[in-house]
Image (cartoon, rainbow, N blue to C red):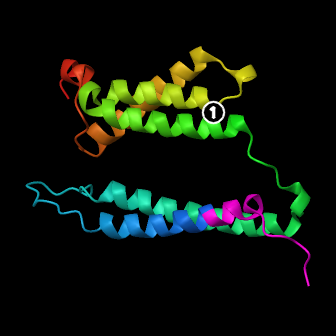
Amino acid sequence: MSTKKFSFQRYRDMILGIFLLALGIFYTVFAQQIKTRPKLTPSYAGARVFPTLLGILLIILSVCMIFQSIRKMKTMQVSDSKKMSKVDLFSILLTFAAMVLYIIILPYLGFIISTIIFLFGQITILAPKEKRNYLLFAIVAVVFTIIAFIAFRIGLSQLLPRGPIEALIGY
């Protein structure tokens, strides 16, 4: 018989992996139910393509997380599990607040400005204080946003929330 006690820290990755797997399946099923209108020109990218790909990616990553947590649990001792620090909890709360703020400002500022602000903020929240490089964070946020905009708007012909920058460039 094993003397290992139940510890949330010990099973947290497994619990999160199972939750994300269920969420990924749920998301993928509902992504398949997105109605698309008939197209005048044939195209491989409909309204349900990207949500379906995201759901499949979430399923794959959550299965990987479950397997990694099983492997980690075999080697982890009860004493190895750490308590969540106040800094970790604060980062989680700030991340949640940043996501809520992003959802709120997206319709008003558009995809480009909102996404740059969100990515810069999120990278800053997650980076250790001693390794923060704000110029690099800004460059990453701008470059990633431009790549995502081009991929969705031009490559996949998907509409994104418009803001002042999208109006200026005509998209």
- Report the number of discs: 1
- Against 4, residue 138 (above or below) is above
**Viewer-proximal residue among 135 and 77:** 77
The amino acid type, in three-letter code, at marker 1 is Leu
Residue 105 image-quadrant placement: top left
> Residue at horizontal 18%, vertical 24%?
170
SS state under label 1 = helix
Q: Which residues are magenta?
A: 1-15
Q: Where in the figure is residue 9, as x and y percent of width and height?
A: 75, 58
What quarter of the picture does the N terminus occupy?
bottom right
Q: Where in the figure is residue 94, as x and y percent of width and height?
A: 54, 34
> Residue at horizontal 29%, vertical 68%?
32
Neighbor class of circle 1 (other Cα within 10 Å; few <14, some 14-19, many 20+) is some
Residue 66 image-quadrant placement: bottom right
Q: Where in the figure is residue 46, as x and y percent of width and height?
A: 24, 57
Residue 60 image-quadrant placement: bottom right
What quarter of the picture does the C terminus occupy?
top left
State whether residue 24 appears in this view: yes
Provide the residue designation for mark 1. 126
- Give left or right: position of 130 versus 54: right
- Give left or right: position of 94 versus 76: left
- Give left or right: position of 34 versus 129: left
